[in-house]
Image: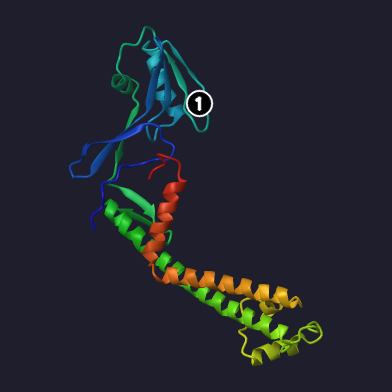
Amino acid sequence: MEVELLCPWYRGFKGSILHSGNDVRGHRIYASSGVVKVVKPTTLVITELPIGLWTLVYKEDTLEQMLAKGLIKGYSDRSCLDNVKLKIYLNEENRKSDDQLIKDFKLTSKLCTDEMVLFDEKDIIIEFHTRKEILVRFFKVRLDYYGRRYEKLLNDYQRELTFLAAKIRFVKAESEGKINVKNVEKGRNALHEELRQEGYPCDESTTGFDYLLRVSDHLSLSLTNKRIQDLRNKREQIRQHLMDLRNTTSEDLWLCDLEALEKALPPGDGL
């Protein structure tokens, strides 16, 4: 299986991640960079730190050191849980490029892809050596569950068609006087036995034949005909769903979900 080259991605990260070379074993190395902006001639604002660098650590290891050496005049921290905002006050007007500022303020970190440790589908920690290993493992598990979902949908549609046919038959039989449910509370067991002998399917997952009794409202003929037509329309919808499903595969279900997810995600959110 050919695997497209994947660049590391972190939700909410506003900086950049670029391929910077390979190590001696051929594994790709990436560099993540934070974001620094010039807001005034002598004022900078850092709005993102590189991946893996905490604000407190950055202030102690970098800004405090620069302040002690007289490289900056001062700084203030207005960062919050979700956003970084470090304002840097310079001793003189800035004449450096953005790339040079990134370098001077140590706003880069290295990301290696040669050691990837993840939990597998059984919550066991596994070390993966390539992206392909991860994807193959994930695809196998994911497709297995889509296969189960496919079979579940097939069974659900077939089951619903069976019960809709029984409801139509029951409403017609009641309207024609072939089944009397007026004394259902007094003779519930007897009615259930009668329905069983007449070949009506029992819903073992709920309460037996209550799915039939719920459609029995002793309606007038016109309303009974409407009830039957509504049930037939519903049955036709389910038949169409079943037909559509049989013309697809479990892989198609996955692709359909991915397309829906891509449309629902905000622009630039990783897909």
Furthest-front residue in view? 222
In the image, residue 249 sits, relative to residue 66, either above or below, namely: below
Furthest-top residue in view? 92
Is residue 165 shown left or right of residue 270?
right
The percent coordinates of residue 268 (x first, y second) are 40, 39
* Disc 1 secondary structure class: loop
The percent coordinates of residue 261 (x first, y second) are 44, 51
Residue 104 visible within the image: yes
Q: Amino acid at mark 1?
A: Ser
Q: Nearer the viewer, residue 229 or 88?
A: 229
In the image, residue 43 sits, relative to residue 212, either above or below, namely: above
Locate the C terminus by quadrant: top left
**Quarter-of-image position of residue 64:** top left
Instruction: Give me the residue at 38% from left, 52% from top.
Output: 118
Instruction: Give me the residue at 26% from left, 49% from top.
Output: 4
Residue 214 visible within the image: no
In the image, residue 101 sits, relative to residue 135, either above or below, namely: above
Q: Nearer the viewer, residue 48 or 160?
A: 160
The percent coordinates of residue 259 (x first, y second) are 40, 53
Instruction: Name the image colouring.
Output: rainbow
**Quarter-of-image position of residue 87:** top left
Question: Which residue in the protein does label 1 denote?
Answer: 79
The percent coordinates of residue 96 (x first, y second) are 30, 14
